[in-house]
Image: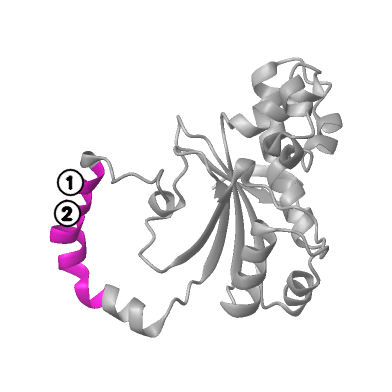
Amino acid sequence: MDHAKPLPSYLVQRYHGWKATGYAENRAWYRHLATEGQHPRAMVISCCDSRVNAISIFGADQGEFFIHRNIANLVPPFRPDGDYHGTSAAVEYAVNVLHVAHLIVLGHSNCGGVKGCLEMCRGNAPDLEDESSFVGRWMDILRPKYDLVAAENDAAVQAQQLEKQAVLVSLENLLTFPFVREKVTAGALTLHGLWTDIGEGWLEYFNPEQQAFQRV
């Protein structure tokens, strides 16, 4: 690995600061996690966006959440075709091995992936249309939902609507996984759809009875 380089100095300094304080003050808990393994109560599927942090939003402790992050917090449909499926593998591990009780899809405002999907649907993103674009092909998961928001004239509102559709399509696709559907039906697993406004700090959840997102 000739191209690998040492960590930037500011990260080295932050690590030493954490080791001397955050770790030192909670050494027993970290050693407990190391020897007893992880037993998270929930899995969170969130966006790679650096502004979204489920740990901070919920004040979670180390070992409490099993977190998987990808572009636009999307879950693809169940497709056991022998190909590489990172998100599907994470869901399988969380449900079948860790036996999480809750599976949360967390969307957010100002999502770059969703913006890219909108641009594709408007015909303004030839680079994402290219078959070699990993982002473009990933956002194809969301693309069919554009028809549900296409009539909205306000661009900001349209983007927000599609961000929430990203959460809903992920919940729909989770139920195409037989092991997820089985546990949901048995009452051993619950699915939750959330959307957070980064600038305002709002958190909304999808209420299936109202078929709408409501503030927590």
- Residue 210 shows up from this direction: no
Q: Is residue 35 above or below residue 82?
A: below
Q: Is residue 174 above or below residue 127?
A: below
Q: Is residue 149 left or right of residue 74?
A: right
Provide the major secondary structure of the magenta segment: helix
Return the residue at label 1. 13
- Of the numbered discs in the image, which one, if any, rests on residue 162? none
Identify the residue shown where x is 69% and y is 51%. 207
**Viewer-side residue, 163 vs 70:** 70
Query: How many other residues sit within 10 Å of disc 1, few (<14), some (14-19) or many (≥20)?
Result: few
Q: Quadrant of residue 61?
A: bottom left
Q: Say what secondary structure mark 2 lies in.
A: helix
- Mark 2 touching mark 1, by CB under 8 A? yes
Q: Position of residue 155 (x, y in %)?
A: 69, 17
Residue 103 falls in image quadrant:
bottom right
Residue at the image point whose x is 65% and y is 78% from the top: 96
Q: Which residues are magenta?
A: 11-29
Q: Hey, which residue is sitting farthest front in the picture?
A: 2
Residue 32, percent from left and from top: 31, 80
Which residue is label 2 attached to? Answer: 16
Q: Is residue 179 visible?
A: yes
Q: Is residue 166 above or below residue 98?
A: above
Of residue 45 and residue 154, the one placed in the foreground of this image is 45
Q: Which sits in the foreground, 204 or 86? A: 86
